[in-house]
Structures are given as C-alpha cells and as structure tokens.
Image: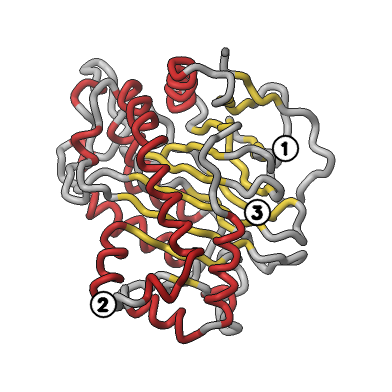
Amino acid sequence: MAATILKTTSSTAAQSATDYTSRSAYNRLPTINLTSDSTNQAFEALSKAASTTGAALITNLSVKPPIASIERLFSTLYTNHTLASRLNATYPTRGIFKAACLNPSSAPNIDQKTTIDLSVARLQKLRELDPALVDDLGQDFDDVLRFYTMVETNIMPLLMQATSRIAGSDLAPLHENRNNNLRLIDYFPSAEPTGPRCGEHRDYGTYTVVFQNGSVGGLEFDVDGKWIQVPANVDAIVSWGWCGAILGNDRVKAAKHRVLRTQPAQKRRTTVVVFVAPDLDATLQPVEASIKKDHPSIWSEQIMAGGLSVREFKQVISKKWRTREGNEEGEVVEGAQDREVSAFVRAA
C-alpha cells in the first residue's frame, strides 16, 4: 500500500492571535495505514516524514492504549491523596504525578493538564522504596506497564531504523540504556482554560510517539508556518525532537507542536506519550555520516566541537518545560521555550 497523505481544507473558524490553519491543501502530514501498508512502505513513509515535516500520522494500530484504565488511574490519584503522595515520594526530586495547574496559587497561563511521568529508572526506584505500591495502584497501573512493553517491542525498533536511515548512520548504539520516558496526560474537561493545554515547543529527545484516545483532538503541528490540526481519530502521531535533529544534522526535522484547546473543548482528552532519547552520557553532535564538509553547520560551536552531552542538554531544556508546566518558578511566555532552545543549539 502506498502511504496516504492527509490533505487539509479550509478551517471552519479562525483562531484569534494565532496563525492557524486546521486544513490546508498545501500543508500535509504523511499518514501510515498499518492495515494496508507493508512494513517497507511504512518504513519509507516514516523516513520521508522524518526529513520533511518532522511528524507523521499512524492509523489502524494493532496496539491500543488502555485509555479507560488511564482515566481511572488519574481519577484515583485525584481523590486518593495518600496514594498520590506515596507515588511522588518514590521520586522526590520532581515527583511523578504532577498537577500544578490545579493549585489555585499557580500562574493561570501554565499548561492546563495533569501528568504521570514514568521511566525504567523511576519504576525500579518505585519498587525498591515502596514494594506494595504497584499492587496498590491496581490493575489499571498494570495495564499501562503492559502497554508500554508492547510499544517497546513492536513500534520503537521501526522508528529507530527510520530515523537512522535519514541520519545516515545506525543510531541504536546511542540509545542502549533505554533513556525513554512514558507520560500519561489528562487534559481534563475545561471549556474555558486559562492557558494553553500544552504550550508550543519541540521535544528534547530523538523521537516521540503520542497515542490518542480516538475521540478528542487538539494536537497541532507547525508545518511551513501554519498550524495543522491532527484529526481526533488518528491512532498515533510520531514526531522528532531536538536530539534527532542534531544527530542527523538537520536531515531529521524537529517538529514544533502544541495543544491550544482540546477539540471539543468540553471533552476529556487522554493521551499516552512515549519519549525516546539518546543515552544521557552520549555526546550530542551530528553523526559523522550526516556532515558535509562543504555545507555550513547550523549548530553551535559547542555542539559541533562535541562539548555538549545529552545530559547537559536535557538539564538546559528541562528548566524551560518545567516552568511552562508550572513545576518550577519562572515567567511563562508562550513560544519562549522554543525560541530560547533554538538560540542555544543553533549557530549564532
């Protein structure tokens, strides 16, 4: 099967103070249909998406996120403060269940969402510090962990191969330590949110997979200066981040995205997001195969000289997203994260 293309049509309503196009004939996001596309066709389409729009839509996934389980898990943590506190105590530095926007004293323009942030290291620490917690979180938590295992087994290898193809070098050796994060997001119902549901930004890692609930949309991508809305019925979205762009020397495009409002606004949007990044101790610079001697670099001297590790870059960019999400003090200005990170990584 040939990969199809999502073409856009005129938006039914203009959004004030934004350059927004929900459907536009000249802006397109590649769509991979896993029912009819062969593995090779899906691979080709993903490779093309990585090098052009920086994002692709995936339909007819056989692996579906346990949305009902995730919604129940959030509801449990909202009401069971003891359980929420125990969960956060296993990662006291930043916490796991984050709900800053629900605090009346928080700035009104931070991201209007709540999250559960997990990783392999955090799960190990959880089991060490509070062995009974996994059982107390119940079957819903088990469903989430089982889904993540299926994603690691069935989806991540294809995406790494596609990204490596564009970069011109096998990137798997730079991703051996499973520096991956699983984020559950609850965009709770809010007809009039005080801020964006998720402010515009590009992810820090190599690539990201967003699994939708199939009925509530809102995710948008900046394609050629126009905001393109992802249909609610798309199963998943793959996008590439700053580490992917740097390793591939801009052959891989980092996609800017946001959730300004859920669509429809009064409905609950629940998503599962998997972030994949290089090993923290890896050097963050273009792989040798991606460098052309006669082509000027777009990256900073520090990056090109091999003077920046993934860990150091994460420390820089994480301060930006923690402020945007209300988990660290600081002024929140829409679009500031992307502008500041761009200035940090790009050549002056």
Residue located farthest toward the right when viewing the structure as drawn: 12
* Alpha carbon separation for disc pair 3 and 2: 38 Å
Residue type indicated by callout 1: Ser
Q: Earlier in the sequence, mark 3 or mark 2?
A: 2
Residue 284 position (above or below residue 185): above
Residue at screen point 45% across, 49% down = 147
In the foreground, 257 or 297: 257
Quadrant where the N terminus sits is: top right
Mark 1: few, some, or many residues within 10 Å (few <14, many ≥20)?
many
Residue type indicated by callout 2: Leu
Asked if the residue at tag 1 contacts the one at tag 2, i.e. Cβ–Cβ closer than 8 Å, the answer is no
Asked if the residue at tag 2 contacts the one at tag 3, i.e. Cβ–Cβ closer than 8 Å, the answer is no
The label on residue 22 is 1
Residue located farthest toward the bottom when viewing the structure as drawn: 82
SS at circle 3: strand
Asked if the residue at tag 1 contacts the one at tag 3, i.e. Cβ–Cβ closer than 8 Å, the answer is no
Q: Is residue 298 left or right of residue 54?
A: left
* Alpha carbon separation for disc pair 2 and 1: 47 Å
Give the residue pinned by disc 2. 129
Residue at screen point 18% across, 25% down = 288
Percent x, y for residue 143? 48, 57
The label on residue 130 is none
- Looking at the rendered image, the disc whose residue lies closer to the viewer, 3 or 2, is 2
Give the residue pinned by disc 3. 260
Residue at screen point 54% across, 49% down = 65
SS at circle 1: loop
